[in-house]
Image: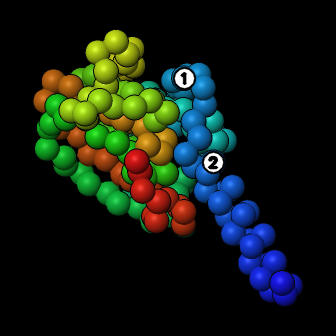
């Protein structure tokens, strides 16, 4: 085989290994907590949910400070729903507008046929105050309880734009 073919094969192997890390989740779950002043971007590398305890009024300030070069989808109002959803973004920032619980189910666990966690599984419930933010890593499952409306910002990097979330 020619050097070009070998180079292509090596490149494909490297890309496969790199992309496979997007689907790997930590074996233990920890909810990270921070304020805006104490937040460090390295927290994203842990692939754990992050709760920002401060009330956030300006989405644009977070977008420009934390994700200046990423593709961002911003929805300031989402219809309340009790259905479970899966994060298809590298990071998903959810901001409830009323006090509520955000229920979480880790990315490495399977949902049942009805797209809900199995009854014997332990869920994470995080009590949220209005305008607080929770940041979910890629593929985490979530639902917002109490029929609370919320805004969200989905952040892609150049890989997650093209990856299936399941």
Residue 25 in the figure: left or right of residue 109 = right
Q: Mark 1 near mark 2, Cβ–Cβ under 8 Å? A: no
Helix, strand or loop status at disc 1: loop
Residue 4 lies in what quarter of the image?
bottom right
Residue 149 lies in what quarter of the image?
top left
Asked whether 110 or 156 is in front, the reply is 110
Q: Is residue 164 above or below residue 4?
A: above
Asked whether 81 or 52 is in front, the reply is 81
Residue 35 percent location from the top left of the image: 52, 31
The disc, 1 or 2, on the residue closer to the chain's N-terminal end is 2
Residue holding disc 2: 21
Say which residue appears at 81% left-offset and 78% top-offset. 6
Helix, strand or loop status at disc 2: helix
Tell me the quarter of the image containing the N terminus.
bottom right
Asked whether 84 or 3 is in front, the reply is 3
Q: Is residue 131 above or below residue 127?
A: below
**Marker count (numbered):** 2
Eye-nearest disc, 1 or 2: 2
Residue 158 in the figure: left or right of residue 129 = right
Residue 3 lies in what quarter of the image?
bottom right
Say which residue appears at 19% left-offset and 46% top-offset. 78
Mark 1 vs mark 2, CA separation in Å: 17 Å
Name of the residue lying farthest toward the front = 1
Residue 69 percent location from the top left of the image: 54, 67
Residue 142 percent location from the top left of the image: 33, 33
Residue 132 in the figure: left or right of residue 115 = right
Say which residue appears at 26% left-offset and 45% top-offset. 151
* Residue 131 in sight here: no
Q: Is residue 6 above or below residue 96?
A: below
Residue 29 image label: 1
């Amino acid at each position: 085989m020619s050097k070009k073919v070998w180079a292509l094969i090596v490149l494909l192997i490297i890309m496969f290994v790199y992309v496979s890390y997007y689907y790997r989740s930590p074996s233990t779950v920890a909810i990270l907590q921070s304020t805006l002043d104490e937040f460090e971007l390295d927290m994203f590398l842990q692939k754990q949910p992050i709760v920002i305890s401060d009330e956030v009024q300006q989405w644009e300030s977070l977008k420009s400070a934390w994700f200046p070069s990423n593709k961002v989808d911003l929805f300031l109002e989402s219809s309340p729903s009790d259905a479970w959803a899966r994060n298809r973004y590298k990071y998903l920032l959810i901001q409830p507008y009323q006090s509520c619980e955000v229920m979480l189910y880790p990315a490495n666990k399977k949902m049942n046929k009805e797209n809900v966690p199995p009854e014997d599984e332990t869920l994470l419930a995080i009590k949220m105050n209005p305008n607080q933010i929770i940041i979910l890593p890629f593929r985490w499952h979530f639902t917002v309880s109490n029929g609370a409306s919320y805004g969200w910002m989905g952040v892609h990097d150049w890989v997650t734009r093209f990856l299936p979330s399941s």
